[in-house]
Image: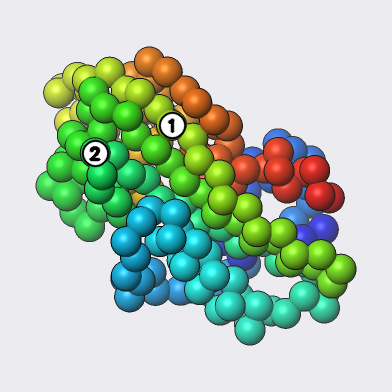
């Protein structure tokens, strides 16, 4: 049993599918204050911030703690969570027809071990259909998603090539975690 210190339903689903027992509760961490020159540095800083906030709130006496963060990058830009529909459209158009990298950092901390992993999955997307993109944008499903990207949803039909683990792109490289549990 572990404490998933994340409100992500996708991370919860990945743990369930892997057969890892968990309870899900977390405290917020404001990522907006992070200044980073590279996507890996950004995702590492965000994960450390989330870890520190949640470790302070919960400790590890009852359960090991698991935190994770994901960042999306394409064409040399860090694509954060979209703030509005127009922002989401611009972020997604940056990815359309291009290579998009999804980088996830996780920290698992138990009494006798601490794991820090940064994994990356690269996708080559074909160009997004404009009408399909507008339907996705109007659905609002992109809200709260790094890079407004859902490789298991909207972006799936546009994937031309994948290099890396799908679980990394979904927010938690669960295969790495399983190796230590």
Residue 88 at what x, y percent from top left? 21, 45
Query: Could you give the CA–CA distance between mark 2 and mark 1, rounded to whole angstroms?
Result: 12 Å
Residue at the spot 80% in from the left edge and 43% down from the top edge: 179
Residue topped by disc 2: 75
Residue at the spot 47% in from the left edge and 46% down from the top edge: 103
Pick the front one: 13 or 67? 67
Residue topped by disc 1: 122
- Relative side of 98 to 166, left or right: left
| Circles 2, 1 touching at the beta carbon (< 8 Å) | no
Location of residue 77 with respect to 17 vertically, above or below: below
Q: Quadrant of residue 2?
A: bottom right
Q: Sort mark 2 into few (<14), some (14-19) or many (20+) by Cα contacts within 10 Å.
A: few
Task: Quadrant for the N terminus, please.
Answer: bottom right
- Residue farthest along the right direction in this orientation: 112
Residue 130 at what x, y percent from top left? 14, 23
Looking at the image, is mark 2 or mark 1 earlier in the sequence?
Answer: 2
Location of residue 174 with respect to 43 vertically, above or below: above
Residue 45 at what x, y percent from top left? 47, 67
Is residue 165 in view?
yes
Pick the front one: 168 or 116? 116
Residue at the spot 58% in from the left edge and 32% down from the top edge: 165
Q: Sort mark 1 into few (<14), some (14-19) or many (20+) by Cα contacts within 10 Å.
A: many
Location of residue 161 with respect to 38 vertically, above or below: above
SS state under label 2: loop
Residue at the spot 15% in from the left edge and 42% down from the top edge: 90
Q: Quadrant of residue 57?
A: bottom right
- Residue farthest along the bottom direction in this orientation: 56
């Amino acid at each position: 049993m572990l404490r998933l210190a994340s409100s992500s339903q996708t991370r919860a689903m990945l743990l369930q599918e892997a057969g890892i027992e968990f309870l899900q509760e977390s405290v917020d961490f404001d990522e907006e204050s992070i200044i980073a020159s590279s996507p890996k540095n950004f995702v590492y800083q965000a994960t450390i911030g989330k870890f520190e906030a949640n470790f302070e709130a919960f400790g590890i006496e009852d359960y090991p703690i698991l935190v994770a963060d994901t960042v999306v990058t394409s064409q040399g830009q860090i694509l954060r969570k979209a703030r509005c529909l127009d922002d989401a459209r611009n972020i997604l158009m940056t990815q359309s027809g291009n290579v998009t990298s999804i980088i996830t950092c996780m920290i698992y901390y138990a009494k006798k071990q601490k794991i820090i992993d940064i994994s990356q999955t690269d996708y080559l997307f074909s160009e997004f259909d404009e009408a399909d993109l507008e339907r996705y944008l109007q659905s609002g499903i992109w809200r709260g998603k790094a890079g407004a990207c859902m490789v298991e949803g909207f972006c799936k039909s546009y994937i031309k090539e994948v290099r890396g683990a799908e679980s990394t792109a979904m927010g938690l490289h669960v295969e790495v975690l399983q190796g230590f549990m």
